[in-house]
Amino acid sequence: MGAFALEIFGLSICIIGWVGVILACALPMWQVSAFIEQNIVVAQFTWEGLWMSCVVQSTGQMQCKVYDSILALEPELQAGRALTVLAAIVGLIALLVTVVGAQCTTCFQGSSVKSRIVFAGGVMYIVTGLLVLIPLCWTANIVIKDFFNPHVPASKKREMGAALYVGWAATALLLLGGVLICLSCPMRGQRTPPVKYSASRRPTSNGDYDKKNYV
């Protein structure tokens, strides 16, 4: 696969992953009610996200409420908010940087700086994936620990919601796309050989070469 195709493919994957990060950040389904023991049949179940909690009735009616206080939130929620928002911002900057350094644009054309810009964009996408991975794994670890903790009441136990899986998929795309973008950059010292054009030298009738051949 050529460097140009590798770059475009990696950038496309990263854009999809970046959109997935925003989606995972906005979805309220980070933790959902666990249907165990006496909670197998319930009239309602709970969704808990970074920004709000929702109660869904068995009739399909849903009521959501934004958290009242930021300081009263659990540490994983506070860290999740900060890191996912930071990841979305870094992903946007990475998109702009990669587009500026892409081979399909005319910015810094013919300069060695262009490949460095693309490489920086790929690294920023990898950083974006790592920023999202931290709150996802943190939240999943807490959910699993509480689920198997016998001291936690069954009504308080939660399971991993769809937002976590969306975030993990987005992280995988960002890491893969960032690596592909970095690999698409030419190695240091590698230069594309310049193409030289020269007109054919044809002698005139008197044996001299026409001066227009030297223009």
Image (cartoon, rainbow, N blue to C red):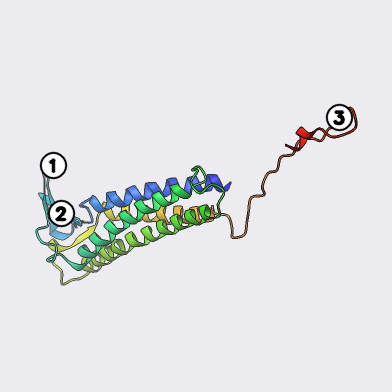
Q: In the image, 47: left or right of 135? A: left
The correct choice, above or below, for 154 with respect to 29 in the image is: below
Question: In the structure shown, which secondary structural element does the residue marked by tag 1 occupy?
Answer: loop
Foreground: disc 3 or disc 2: 3
Disc 3 + disc 2, Cβ < 8 Å: no
Residue 49 figure quarter: bottom left
Q: In the image, 10: left or right of 62? A: right
Tag 2 residue: 52
Cα distance between the residues tagged 3 and 2: 86 Å
Tag 1 or tag 3, which sits nearer the N-term?
A: 1
* Residue 93 position in % (x across, y down): 36, 53
Tag 3 residue: 204
Tag 1 residue: 60
Residue 51 figure quarter: bottom left
The C terminus: image quadrant: top right
Q: Mark 1: which amino acid? A: Gly
* Residue 106 position in % (x across, y down): 50, 43
* Residue 97 position in % (x across, y down): 42, 52
The correct choice, above or below, for 12 with respect to 32 in the image is: above
